[in-house]
Amino acid sequence: MTQIADVDRDARRTLELLGPAPDNWVPERPGIDHDVFIVGGGQTGCAFAFALRRAGIGRVSVIDAAANAAKAGVWLNRARMNKLRTPKILVGPEGGLPGLGFRAWYEARFGEASYQEIDRIPRERWAEYLAWYREFLQIPVRYGTRLVRIEPQDAHFRLHLDVNGSTHVETARKLLLCNGVAGNGGAFVPPVLAQLPARFVAHTSDPIDFVALRGKSVAVVGGAASAFDAAATALEAGAAEVHLFARRASLAATPVSRARAYPGAYDNYFDLPDALRWAQALRFKRSGSTAPPDSIERVTRFDNFHLHLGTQWESARETAGQIEAVAAGESLRFDFAIAGTGYFIDPAARPELAGFASQILLWRDRFTPPQGDADDELGAHPYLGEALEYQQKVAGQAPFLKDIHVYNPAGFVSAGVPVGDVPSMKRDIPAVVRRISRDLFLADIDSHQRRLSADVPAEFDESAYAASIWRRETSSA
């Protein structure tokens, strides 16, 4: 095993070759605390902070609602897969600098041979890498800080924050929402589960005490990866039995999104016609989100795992301290139920967005699908610009929306990739940083015009070359 110090040495050499980060070129404005305010201190929030630093944009603040670094993000908390679902070769938060990437970090710790042996990145190793990335690059994250309300002002925002239980107000010119899968909505719990007493039900996004499920009968509703990961975690914790209920007659097994995973489609996705982007999103939804084969193998090796296909819960109630559920006409009893049923998109459901959610342009406002291709859930996604910025539903009524960039899964229909995950980083982080840079620059064009036209002192005078000036000889005739 390679010495851990080699990791920092190689990464430090990468930064040395890159050169120092530019000085902050953004002029300060009276009354403005932050030029860019990043909501979410996980993998994407830190990646943006580094990219903005390299673009010479200072006065950047990153907040996270978690109490500390160990509780921030999903990888040591809500994520329960053994391995990441994305290929290990994708460009991530390193932003094209291999010395800062996962492979360099991993090989420096465990060797090149070990990297070749892994097919996908182990989840806990990814969490370790992200912690190293944040600490090595010295990216400050303000933990225990939650954005409560965004109040648009003239050319900036007043941000109402809850900081460890106390109220603060700060100001910023640009907002980046790197706030995860529920960042433009919330966790979806089917009504049949939502009406049960809270002690019987959890969503996969919730902290779940799996140890307490030892010896218990557990139901998992949902057929995608998070449902299988939750079922596996319950089984591994010693649950007496786990039943997983999927609506489809067979599990989704075709990852249709791979058809567009080539540079031409990836790089130019925002230039596709709306009809084609809609069709791609609809194809993905109809095909279903696939669980990786190893997630399925993880549960099927248990004899006490039971899969119910083509089955939805018809009713559920509390009976004698248990859940009595009726599914496909069969009555079943469980001690606990887990909803692996994904998330809904609705900006109005987010308190920080609620004040202006009705002014955000949604896909249903912009595009009318052909007959038979309508979909209310997809239509609720915001219609984002090429820099993942909100757009106005009515021109001129909410110009501030272009200064809020959405780096979470609400961008899926617009961007064609799971925004916020590793597949979106290579294209979208540079695009968002480029737009932020442009907007900040043009907003202060008078100041920059003076700077561009300022006197520049000469580096030398005529004495530096006087002796070498050619002088034509004159004739004495």
Image (cartoon, rainbow, N blue to C red):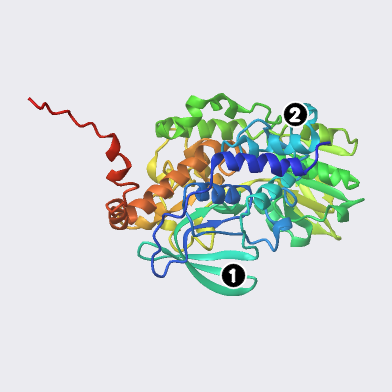
**Residue furthest out toward the left:** 477
Q: How far across and how far down the image is residue 165, in percent?
A: 64, 73
Is residue 2 left or right of 372 when viewed as pictured? right
Q: Is residue 223 visible?
A: no
Is residue 414 left or right of 447 when viewed as pictured? right
As rendered, which of 76 and 78 lies closer to the eye? 76
Q: Can residue 314 be seen in this view?
A: yes
As rendered, which of 394 and 80 lies closer to the eye? 80
Residue drawn where x is 52% and y is 48% of the image: 21
* Amino acid found under the numbered disc labelled 2: Asp
Q: Quadrant for residue 422, please give it.
A: top right
**Label 1 secondary element:** strand
Residue position marked by numbered label 1 in the rendering: 162
- Which of labels 2 and 1 is toward the front? 2
**Label 2 secondary element:** loop
Q: Quadrant for residue 418, please give it.
A: top right
Residue position marked by numbered label 2 in the rendering: 119
Is residue 59 left or right of 475 when viewed as pictured? right
Q: In this view, does 88 lie above or below 72?
A: above
Q: In this view, does 22 lie above or below 355?
A: above
Residue drawn where x is 47% and y is 53% of the image: 23
As rendered, which of 159 and 287 lies closer to the eye? 159
Q: Quadrant for residue 313, please give it.
A: top right
Q: How far across and how far down the image is residue 470, in percent?
A: 23, 31
Q: How far across and how far down the image is residue 475, in percent?
A: 11, 26
**Residue furthest out toward the front:** 477
Q: In this view, does 333 lie above or below 264?
A: below
Where does the C terminus fall, quadrant-wise? top left
Is residue 257 left or right of 331 when viewed as pictured? left
